[in-house]
Amino acid sequence: MITPDTKLRHRHEDVLPQVSSPRTTQSMSSTDDMSVSTQTLIPQLPYNQQHQHHNGTRIPSAASSAYPESRGHQWVQQYTGILTLAGMCTSLLSTVFGLFHVDVFLRVYQLPWHSYSMGTMIFAAINTANDVLGAWLLDKAATKRSRSDLIGISGVIFSLFFLAPFFRWKDPSPNGYYDEAHFVISICMYDTMYSFTTILLGSLVTDNHTLTDKERVSVLASGKVLSLVTTFAVSKIGLVIFDQDDMKKFRLFLVCLSAIVTVIFLLAQTMAHYHIFIRWESMRIIFLDVKHEKPPIHKSSEKLIPRQVVLDFWKHDNFWAWIWMELLLEAQNSFYSAFLKTFVDQLLHDEGVSRETCDWLLSSSRPLGLILAILCYIPIRRIGYTKVYNILIAISFAMSLLMLMTSTHQSTTFIAVFLVIYPATTAAVVSTGFHLVMSDMVLEMKRIHAMEGRFDEPSLAALFIGVNALFCKPAESILPIVSAHMLENYSLATEDDENVQKVLFKLLVIPPLVFSIVEFLSWRRYTLTPSMTTQMRDNLRLLELNHITPTNGMDSVLPIHTKMSDEDMSLS
């Protein structure tokens, strides 16, 4: 006797193998004298008609397993090259900006601490709104065109805005209003385009679920390998040229860097559309269209609805477990990046450490972080990023507690070791884990949409990064504002000021000690383990390939075309 439950189970089991082999035609056979018509789950179609909904729109690329493997491999290589070049350019500009901008405003321009504090607060409010707006526009534009089409224009504007903080009028106003305006406007210009560019590049990784885990790690790691050499060279050159009494050579260096980065951004944009070959014997440059190699792009017919987007994020528990940890990590990472030169100059150089040693420490900080970031992929591949974050939190707590108990502002050796290890380790884990976490949460959101039958929903890949910035950008201003209030009565231009050194030492070791406790409590609620994300990816692919309508959870879902009729249900 065949019960309805038995039929449901048999039919569901017949469907499952199709996930890994969608071109295979399988039929569902009946038992005894009952027959069920056979049909092909995924019929053979011309390539340009594959992966489409019943309304003609293409389904998300996570389901594109029928995409030709050889073409897919060629496009992955091209895709890696695009992101590597664009990521290297972003890293070069952000490294130079982070290394010098605080020193330029506070020591060269001698911006008062209260002006720095007020400007930081205004900047935080403006750029938080800019990040969310930029992410919204990116996801909206992605429903009509490829995100990679925006790399060139975004990069060119970013490289121009990068120069704004380092150029100002010769005669500042006596009351300092023009200096404050220059600080706020120039920093906002830079950070707006920095955030837009990083959100753009990040969403290109997190929204691409045709990439395997190995390919995604390769894309992320390759950019760090190239940035490792270039950022070290640029940092070293900048430190040699930088002279707070005469900025002409340094500004010329910045203009040259901006011009080179602009050219590379435009090259990356060109690579999004063409293979570039140089025929040296004929001195010709050949451009071959790569359109036939690209996987199909999901162009949604639905629009982003603000209320629905807010509800989607509100119900995303893992996002909230992530965000409270991430905002504290970003607050520390941003603060140590901006104030690293201040810490080195005040706590090491003013205590007798040579200028050459200090410059080597400063120039090697970013490359060391990139080396550790590359090495981080080894434990991430073995134990997952969730455990790697736990290890980072434990290291932060232990190092800061040890420093607080055993060291003072005059312990140059311990301070130097802390400045070498802690910022680099934090930056490494944050940079490696961020896009992997974002990718998994975007995957989970897509799976939630599919479970609710919302197959044509626009991707929220950029908005995940934008909403992340909505919380992290204000948090990045916390420590600089606290520093400004604590140091308001002192001047960084005054050497051998013991009070400044004491305050800076506290700012160096206390925040990681306090923040790590909160980070641990928040991160322990995060549930996206490697095995769970693998299962979600399979479930999402099954839902997309067969247009499954969920009823009572994943155990009971069936393809639409295998639903049983009332007559079938009456058979026994």
Image (cartoon, rainbow, N blue to C red):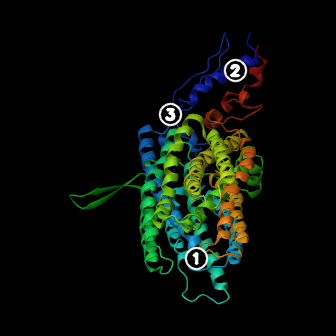
Type of residue at label 1?
Arg
Q: Residue at x 57, y 53 (%)?
A: 202
Relative side of 306 to 217, left or right? right
Q: Amino acid at mark 3?
A: Gln
Residue wearing tag 1: 107
Pick whichever of labels 2 and 3 is earlier in the sequence.
2
Closer to viewer: mark 2 or mark 3: 2
Mark 3 vs mark 1: which is more N-terminal? 3
Residue at 59% across, 64% down: 347
Name above or below for residue 318 compared with residue 283: above
Q: Could you say which quadrant of the image residue 383 lies in?
A: top right
The residue at which mark 2 appears reads as 9
Residue drawn at 64 percent across, 50 percent down:
459
- Looking at the image, which residue sits at the far left? 281
Decide which of 124, 502 is in the foreground and name it: 502
Residue 444 percent location from the top left of the image: 67, 42
Say whether disc 2 or disc 1 marks the residue closer to the N-terminus. 2
Circles 2, 3 touching at the beta carbon (< 8 Å): no
> Residue 1: image x %, image y %?
74, 9
Residue position for label 3: 44
